[in-house]
């Protein structure tokens, strides 16, 4: 076994030892100073608003979204975690600027020996179980995004993502409530933002195109509807020339008048697309073309697909039937 | 510091078995990161950035290549060079520093190869490196390589049971905090009125030894200069190296295995 000489070779460099001790002392001093003379709390950087009960009937869905910050300071652990959370995230200039410019910041806190009914109601509504956490909502209280412990960079990414999703959620909400003018505004906003998020994701983009097309048609903006449909189809087919049967391209081609109802249903079956979407698309298009009998038939078929009740198209088919004056029993998704 | 030991240690890392296994890991990791980069979402891009320039690559590579507790170097046929290098007495601190520096260089080389591969893969999907590559990413890569290599040098200089225990604690803290908070740099002055200041100070002082890495973005974008993060980072690197020198001085060591 090869060994180094004892004595000459195993001395610790004095510079290293002294600098280590000095740095450790400095560390202790800095920590002591920070503890005994704490910096100002983050409330000074961000002006948090007091929480109010949610107004679910608000129609200004495209207004500034709300950022709820939940913190639970009922015990010592909660206080420590809240302090750490705020020191980590709300001291970052970029985070503060992003929140100030794009959100209505609302702090919902629970403190020991203080009434906390609103805290309980809001945290239950938004399914918050881990504190501290943040929830982004539309003005009517529709939950868009949730996050808890993150690095400041990741929080910025999540908040930007949430901002982009807000317009999409607003569009979906407006479609469900039959407010097609607002839906058109929301879809146009998503596109004008040239967001690199949801809109460019192929499946979502295609689904959004269908909904935007119907919203425009409901508003009798035929030319714009044709333009939206034509643009998406040409972009998609230029990029993937052999994918004209990939789902939901058959639905878009049907809306453009290139294929018949039978072809859509056949290709849906052949390529595994959800029938609920096919029936919804056929139903609404027939309704808009004045063929109410076919419309009712296909919308009822869409609503009969109870296994797809989490899909947007299922909920939208129910909403369309209601608009046509049909009695649709309420369900959890409504 | 000995240039001969530095060059020789780097040469030891280029052992064929190590290279093959690391190449496989790099390729797998690059594919994953490239896929995340290709996805058109800011959140996945941020994930990709932390996977490329965060603490995981430095820690895993340093452990795999440097630490005798994990890297089996017994099978390497390095003996023929040792007699020349150790023909004169070599200070052990010099050996520790050479090992640390060689580890930093090796890890940075791995990070660069990793990033180039991932960006090339993402480039196929039309994504630009500038989406994730900024001055903070470069700073994080260098600073994490420096600090995590120092930590692994400390672990590798300890006898096996101690090394394993320290590794387990550090790893648990890293995983817990990195998964929860992101890069660890959150021990900014904490003041809790319900606790005595001395308890808070002592707890922070002790816990800060686990705060290995630093998040340069957090430091530079903070509304007030987080002096505490910087002091903790620098003092931890110096402390790890000093302790590893101290440990090496107190035990026998065999170069081919250490």
Image (spheres, helix red, strand yellow):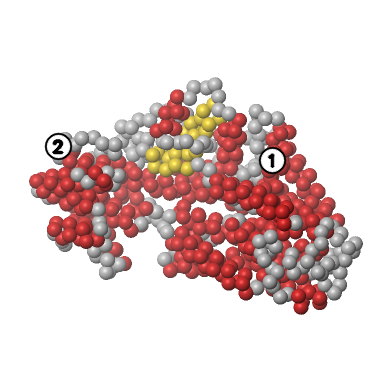
- For image coordinates 54% across by 68% down, the residue present is B24
In the image, taking residue A175 as reference, residue B63 lies left or right, namely: right
At numbered mark 2, what does the secondary structure look like: helix, strand or loop? loop
Q: Which corner quadrant holds the C terminus of chain B?
A: bottom right
Image quarter of residue A230: bottom left
One can see residue B204 in this view: yes
At numbered mark 1, what does the secondary structure look like: helix, strand or loop? helix
Query: What chain does mark 2 sit on?
Result: A
One can see residue A175 in this view: no
- For image coordinates 51% across by 49% down, the residue present is A154
Q: Could you say where residue B123 lies in the image, as x and y percent from the top left?
A: 45, 67
Above or below residue B4? Residue A112 is above
Above or below residue A71? Residue B211 is below
- For image coordinates 64% across by 43% down, the residue present is B187
Residue placed most toward the observer, A165 or A1:
A1
Q: Which corner quadrant holds the N terminus of chain B?
A: bottom right
In the image, taking residue B107 as reference, residue A188 lies left or right, namely: left
Q: Pointer 2: what residue?
A: A325
Q: Could you say where residue A74 lies in the image, as x and y percent from the top left?
A: 55, 28
| Residue at mark 1 to residue at mark 2: CA–CA distance | 66 Å
Residue placed most toward the observer, A192 or B204:
B204
In the image, taking residue A72 as reference, residue A3 lies left or right, namely: right
Give a yes or no on whether discs 1 and 2 share a subunit: no
Query: What chain does mark 1 sit on?
Result: B
Q: Pointer 1: what residue?
A: B204
Q: Could you say where residue B36 lies in the image, as x and y percent from the top left?
A: 46, 59
10 Å neighbourhood of mark 1: few (<14), some, or many (≥20)?
A: some
10 Å neighbourhood of mark 2: few (<14), some, or many (≥20)?
A: few
Residue placed most toward the observer, A73 or A220:
A73
In the image, taking residue B213 as reference, residue A207 lies left or right, namely: left
Q: Could you say where residue A12 lies in the image, as x and y percent from the top left?
A: 84, 57
- For image coordinates 71% across by 34% down, the residue present is B199
């Amino acid at each position: 076994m090869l060994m180094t000489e004892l004595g000459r070779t195993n001395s610790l460099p004095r510079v290293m030892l002294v600098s280590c001790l000095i740095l450790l002392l400095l560390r202790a001093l800095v920590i002591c100073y920070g503890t005994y003379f704490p910096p100002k709390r983050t409330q000074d950087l961000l002006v948090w608003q007091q929480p109010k009960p949610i107004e679910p009937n608000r129609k200004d869905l495209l207004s500034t979204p709300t950022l709820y910050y939940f913190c639970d300071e009922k015990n010592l652990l909660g206080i420590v975690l809240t302090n750490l959370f705020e020191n980590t995230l709300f001291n970052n200039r970029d985070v503060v600027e992003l929140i100030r410019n794009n959100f209505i910041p609302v702090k919902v806190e629970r403190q020991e020996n203080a009434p906390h009914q609103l805290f309980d109601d809001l945290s239950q509504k938004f399914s918050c179980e881990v504190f501290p956490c943040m929830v982004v909502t539309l003005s009517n209280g529709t939950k868009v995004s949730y996050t808890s412990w993150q690095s400041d960079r990741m929080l910025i990414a999540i908040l930007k993502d949430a901002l982009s999703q807000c317009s999409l959620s607003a569009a979906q909400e407006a479609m469900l409530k039959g407010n097609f003018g607002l839906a058109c505004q929301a879809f146009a906003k998503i596109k004008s933002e040239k967001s690199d998020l949801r809109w460019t994701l192929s499946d979502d983009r295609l689904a959004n195109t269908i909904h935007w097309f119907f919203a425009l048609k409901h508003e009798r903006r035929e030319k714009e509807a044709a333009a939206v449909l034509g643009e998406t189809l040409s972009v998609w087919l230029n990029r993937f020339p052999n994918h004209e049967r990939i789902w939901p391209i058959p639905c878009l081609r049907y809306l453009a008048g290139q294929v018949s109802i039978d072809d859509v249903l056949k290709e849906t079956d052949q390529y595994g697309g959800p029938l609920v979407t096919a029936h919804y698309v056929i139903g609404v298009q027939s309704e808009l073309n004045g063929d109410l009998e076919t419309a009712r038939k296909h919308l009822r078929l869409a609503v009969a697909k109870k296994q797809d009740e989490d899909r947007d198209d299922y909920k939208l088919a129910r909403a369309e039937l209601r608009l046509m004056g049909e009695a649709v029993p309420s369900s959890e998704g409504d | 510091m000995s240039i001969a030991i530095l060059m020789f240690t780097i040469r030891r890392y280029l052992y064929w078995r190590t290279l093959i296994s690391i190449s496989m890991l790099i390729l797998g990791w690059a594919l994953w990161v490239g896929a995340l980069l290709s996805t058109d979402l800011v959140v996945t891009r941020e994930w990709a950035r932390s996977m490329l320039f965060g603490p995981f690559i430095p820690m895993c590579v340093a452990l795999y290549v440097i630490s005798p507790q994990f890297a089996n170097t017994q099978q390497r046929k390095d003996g023929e060079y040792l007699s020349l290098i150790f023909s004169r007495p070599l200070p052990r601190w010099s050996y520790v520093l050479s090992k640390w520096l060689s580890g930093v260089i090796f890890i940075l080389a791995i990070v660069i190869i990793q990033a180039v591969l991932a960006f090339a893969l993402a480039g196929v999907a039309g994504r630009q490196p500038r989406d994730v590559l900024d001055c903070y990413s470069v700073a994080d890569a260098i600073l994490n390589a420096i600090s995590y290599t120092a930590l692994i040098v400390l672990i590798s200089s300890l006898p096996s049971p101690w090394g394993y225990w320290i590794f387990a604690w550090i790893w648990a803290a890293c995983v817990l905090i990195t998964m929860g908070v992101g890069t660890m740099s959150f021990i900014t002055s904490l003041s809790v009125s319900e606790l005595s200041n001395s308890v808070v100070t002592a707890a922070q002082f002790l816990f800060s030894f686990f705060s290995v890495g630093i998040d340069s973005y957090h430091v530079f974008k903070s509304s007030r200069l987080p002096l505490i993060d910087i002091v903790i980072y620098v003092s931890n690197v110096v402390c790890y190296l000093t302790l590893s020198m101290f440990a090496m001085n107190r035990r026998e060591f065999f170069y081919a295995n250490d």
